[in-house]
Image: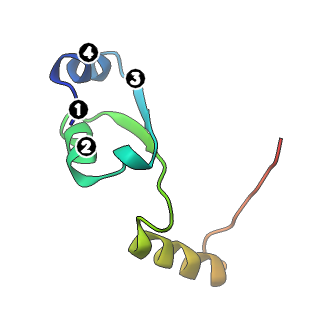
């Protein structure tokens, strides 16, 4: 879960929390939301099936455009 000491500090500094698939779970996200912290979390398709079904539908219906850039 979000560390109380550093979570409070980063919330005060208006920092953006970055996290991979291990952090994109309800308890961690809820702790950030409760502190009104900005965040960017990524997740894998096999661990967030419902989310990726919605995204795939939105892409297929051209509601959500996709931009890929390889550097």
Dividing the picture into quadrants, the one containing residue 33 is: top left
Residue in view at x 61 percent, y 70 percent:
64
Q: Which residue is identified by label 4?
A: 9
Numbered disc 4: secondary structure: helix
Q: Which residue is identified by label 2?
A: 28
Q: Residues within 10 Å of mark 1 (few under 14, many from 20)?
A: some
Closest to the camera, between mark 1 and mark 3, is: 1
Q: Earlier in the sequence, mark 4 or mark 3?
A: 4
Q: Earlier in the sequence, mark 2 or mark 1?
A: 1
Alpha carbons under labels 4 and 2: distance apart: 16 Å
Indicate left or right for 3 with 23 as reference: left
Residue 66 position within the rendered picture, expressed as x and y whole percent measured from the top left = 70, 64
Q: Residues within 10 Å of mark 3 (few under 14, many from 20)?
A: few
Q: Earlier in the sequence, mark 2 or mark 3?
A: 3
Alpha carbons under labels 2 and 1: distance apart: 6 Å
Residue 42 position within the rendered picture, expressed as x and y whole percent measured from the top left = 49, 49
Residue in view at x 28 percent, y 46 percent:
29
Alpha carbons under labels 2 and 3: distance apart: 16 Å
Q: Earlier in the sequence, mark 1 or mark 4?
A: 1
Q: Can you tell which mark lies on residue 2?
A: 1
Alpha carbons under labels 1 and 4: distance apart: 11 Å
Q: Nearer the viewer, residue 9 or 24?
A: 24
The quarter in which the N terminus is drawn is top left
Q: Earlier in the sequence, mark 1 or mark 3?
A: 1
Q: Which residue is identified by label 3?
A: 15
Q: Earlier in the sequence, mark 4 or mark 2?
A: 4
Closest to the camera, between mark 2 and mark 3, is: 2
Answer whether labels 1 and 3 touch (C-beta < 8 Å): no
Q: Residues within 10 Å of mark 4 (few under 14, many from 20)?
A: few
Dividing the picture into quadrants, the one containing residue 28 is: top left
Answer whether labels 2 and 1 touch (C-beta < 8 Å): yes
């Amino acid at each position: 879960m979000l560390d109380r000491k550093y979570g409070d500090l980063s919330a005060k500094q208006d920092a953006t929390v970055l996290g991979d698939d291990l952090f994109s779970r309800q308890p961690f996200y809820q702790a950030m939301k409760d502190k009104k912290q900005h965040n960017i979390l990524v997740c894998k398709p096999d661990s967030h099936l419902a989310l990726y079904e919605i995204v795939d539908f939105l892409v297929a219906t051209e509601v959500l455009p996709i931009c890929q850039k390889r550097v």
